[in-house]
């Protein structure tokens, strides 16, 4: 487990169990009055339930003594009906207030989790699978909701009803009450023992559910690859094996849970047997009346529910606490990249960039991906970057886009040190086309307008034309309303890249970074895109990273990266004349017809 993350490398989340209840404290404060009203309604239900046996006792004693009349029995029946109606109304209110509270907690906690996830960075998502995170937002939140809803109701009801019924039983006959509660210590011991084992087993269930969720997600999102390699049967067998493990883990939980309720029920029925034996003798001797005996049994039935509910309540709270501790572990994760204490928001409009001795190493790696990089980009100019795989091109783009922390060296935008200004200030000035194009399972129009949700159709179409994708979109049956599936599965690689470029152009920001964004298109389309976006680049700072020379040949300046260092710098003509590495790439790509679509010499990398 990585220190400070609270999350293991396998994606399992671990917390400190009962200490995680503090995560819910704000919600209990916020909805305190609603909960108080719900508990008041719950108390009223219990009081009415406790009064019904007294009415029955009165009627039975009247029958035994020969004092009963049709009018008296009818009046007792009316009282019971009125109490039943009162109980029904009170149940409606406590369900609305208390169960409604649990649903609000679930919603607010889910929103809080999602907002927290949006603030985390690459380091977290590289170590934790989406399936593990999705399990927290589904199974674990459901367990928390059940514990804060029916769990709280059952606990309160069991304690209040149990104590009240015990008091009425004591009032009828203390000796018989002591006999009835004789098995209670055994129930408490067994419940404690079984519940302690439930926590560990339920944790395994949740972790295996995370594995299952992630496997399904990754398989569906990579369905083309699965089919291309004819792995449908193999993936099906793997899923079946994971499912069997999940079932075995659930059976382990069911064995304990299945033991809790029968044990509680057995002990409760044992109490009933003792009451029948000893209470019946008391009635025969005349120590208590038949009405008292009937009322006592009624109270014992009311007390049986708390006795049996102990196991169920323990199970609900163990599940809820286990899940809450996993959620708390996620909420404690801090992003490696965050605003400094004195960071300020500043406008970045000119697009001037300066790097001073910038170096970077990924956590846990000794090798420097970037080592002492220095250069400056004049506002409104185009910078090209080329280099071998692993030379640090993509890492440099991520640093410039403020997706990685600047810990060694300095980076300035319009003269502002990025560590002294807010992250949003920098990101709001940049339109970034990453090497790995990410699209949402939505319409083409939505994906292009992702950063500009209020953009009209004309602006979206203009950006698409500049990215040389409009004609292909227009040829689709639903045009810009066409849904593209998971990660744009309905589109080719080149179409996905051009949609990403259109999305960046639509942002209309002073700085544009394109990290190998034309690698999946042919040479003809590449030239068309470069020509059409030229008008968009006027007055903007543009950084183009490519493994082909063509996209960067017309740049104002080109940088050649080699093992994290600048190995060459200048214009296209200057580099051909002065840099053997750059010249060899150019000669190879121009000598081979159609070269550039495979990137045999250079390709995208770190």
Image: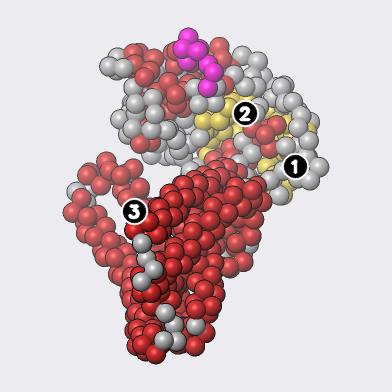
Quick check: 584 left or right of 562? left
Looking at the picture, how far across and down is residue 340, in whole percent? Answer: 76, 45
Q: How many other residues sit within 10 Å of disc 2, few (<14), some (14-19) or many (≥20)?
A: many
Query: Mark 1 or mark 3, which is nearer to you?
Result: 3
Residue denoted by label 1:
419
| Kind of element beneath mark 2 | strand
Depth check, front residue: 3 or 307: 307
Q: Residue at x 58, y 42 (%)?
A: 115
Which of the two labelled residues, at mark 1 and mark 3, occupies the earlier sequence position? 3
- Is residue 259 visible in the rendered image? The answer is no
Which residue range is magenta in the image?
Answer: 453-460
- Compared to residue 54, the image places residue 476 above or below, namely above
Query: Mark 2 or mark 3, which is nearer to you?
Result: 3
Q: Which image quarter: residue 507? A: top right
Quick check: 427 left or right of 158? right
Which of the two labelled residues, at mark 2 and mark 3, occupies the earlier sequence position? 3
Residue denoted by label 3:
215
Looking at the picture, how far across and down is residue 488, in whole percent? Answer: 36, 32
Depth check, front residue: 284 or 96: 284
Looking at the picture, how far across and down is residue 544, in whole percent? Answer: 55, 28
- Compared to residue 339, the image places residue 383 above or below, namely above
Q: Residue at x 30, y 44 (%)?
A: 220
Whether tag 1 and tag 3 are in contact, CB under 8 A, the answer is no
The magenta stretch spans residue 62: no
Looking at the picture, how far across and down is residue 523, in whole percent? Answer: 38, 23
In three-dimensional space, the C-alpha distance between marks 2 and 3, rounded to whole angstroms, equals 35 Å
Residue denoted by label 2:
430
In three-dimensional space, the C-alpha distance between marks 1 and 3, rounded to whole angstroms, equals 38 Å
In three-dimensional space, the C-alpha distance between marks 2 and 1, rounded to whole angstroms, equals 16 Å
Which of the two labelled residues, at mark 2 and mark 1, occupies the earlier sequence position? 1
């Amino acid at each position: 487990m990585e220190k400070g993350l609270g999350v293991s490398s396998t994606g399992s989340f671990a917390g400190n169990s009962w200490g995680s209840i503090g995560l819910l404290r704000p919600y209990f404060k916020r909805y305190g009055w609603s909960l108080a009203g719900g508990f008041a309604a719950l108390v009223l239900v219990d009081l009415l339930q406790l009064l019904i046996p007294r009415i029955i006792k009165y009627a039975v004693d009247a029958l035994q003594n020969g004092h009963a009349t049709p009018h008296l029995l009818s009046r007792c029946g009316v009282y019971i009906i009125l109490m039943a109606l009162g109980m029904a109304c009170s149940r409606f209110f406590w369900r609305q207030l208390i169960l409604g509270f649990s649903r609000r907690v679930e919603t607010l906690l889910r929103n809080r989790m999602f907002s927290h996830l949006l603030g985390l960075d690459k380091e977290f998502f590289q170590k934790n699978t989406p399936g593990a995170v999705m399990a927290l937002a589904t199974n674990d939140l459901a367990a928390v909701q059940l514990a804060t809803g029916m769990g709280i109701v059952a606990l309160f009801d069991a304690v209040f009803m149990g104590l009240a019924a015990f008091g009425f039983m004591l009032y009828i006959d203390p000796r018989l009450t002591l006999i009835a509660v004789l098995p209670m210590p055994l129930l408490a011991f067994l419940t404690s023992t079984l519940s302690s084992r439930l926590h560990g087993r339920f944790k395994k269930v949740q972790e295996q559910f995370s594995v299952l969720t992630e496997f399904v997600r990754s398989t569906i999102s990579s369905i083309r690859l699965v089919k291309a390699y004819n792995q449908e049967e193999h993936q099906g067998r793997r899923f079946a094996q994971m499912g069997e493990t999940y079932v075995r883990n659930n059976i382990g939980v069911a064995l304990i849970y299945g033991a809790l309720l029968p044990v509680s029920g057995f002990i409760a029925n044992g109490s009933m047997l003792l009451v029948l034996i000893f209470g019946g003798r008391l009635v025969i001797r005349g120590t208590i009346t038949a009405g008292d005996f009937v009322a006592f049994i009624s109270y014992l039935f009311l007390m049986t529910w708390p006795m049996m509910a102990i196991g169920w309540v323990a199970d609900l709270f163990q599940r809820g606490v286990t899940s809450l501790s996993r959620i708390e572990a996620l909420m404690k994760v801090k992003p490696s990249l965050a605003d400094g204490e004195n960071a300020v928001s500043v406008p970045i409009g000119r697009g001037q960039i300066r790097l001073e001795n910038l170096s970077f190493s990924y956590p846990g790696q000794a090798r420097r991906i970037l080592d002492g990089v220095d250069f400056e980009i004049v506002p409104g100019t185009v910078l090209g970057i080329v280099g071998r795989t692993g030379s640090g091109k993509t890492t440099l783009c991520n640093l410039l886009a403020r997706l990685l922390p600047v810990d060694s060296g300095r980076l300035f935008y319009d003269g502002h040190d990025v560590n002294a200004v807010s992250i949003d200030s920098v990101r709001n000035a940049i339109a970034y086309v990453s090497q790995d194009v990410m699209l949402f399972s939505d319409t083409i129009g939505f994906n292009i307008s992702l950063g500009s949700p209020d953009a009209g159709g004309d602006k979206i179409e203009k950006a698409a034309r500049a990215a040389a994708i409009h004609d292909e979109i227009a040829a689709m049956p639903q045009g810009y309303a066409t849904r593209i599936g998971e990660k744009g599965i309905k589109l080719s690689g080149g179409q996905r890249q051009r949609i990403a470029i259109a999305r960046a152009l639509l942002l209309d920001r002073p700085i544009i970074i394109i990290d190998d964004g034309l690698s999946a298109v042919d040479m003809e389309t590449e030239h068309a895109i470069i020509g059409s976006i030229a008008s968009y680049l006027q007055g903007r700072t543009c950084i183009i990273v490519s493994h082909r020379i063509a996209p960067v040949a017309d740049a104002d300046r080109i940088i050649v990266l080699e093992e994290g260092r600048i190995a060459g710098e200048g214009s296209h003509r200057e580099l051909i004349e002065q840099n053997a590495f750059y010249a060899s790439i150019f000669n190879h790509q121009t000598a081979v017809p159609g070269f550039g679509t495979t990137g045999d010499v250079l390709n995208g990398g770190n």
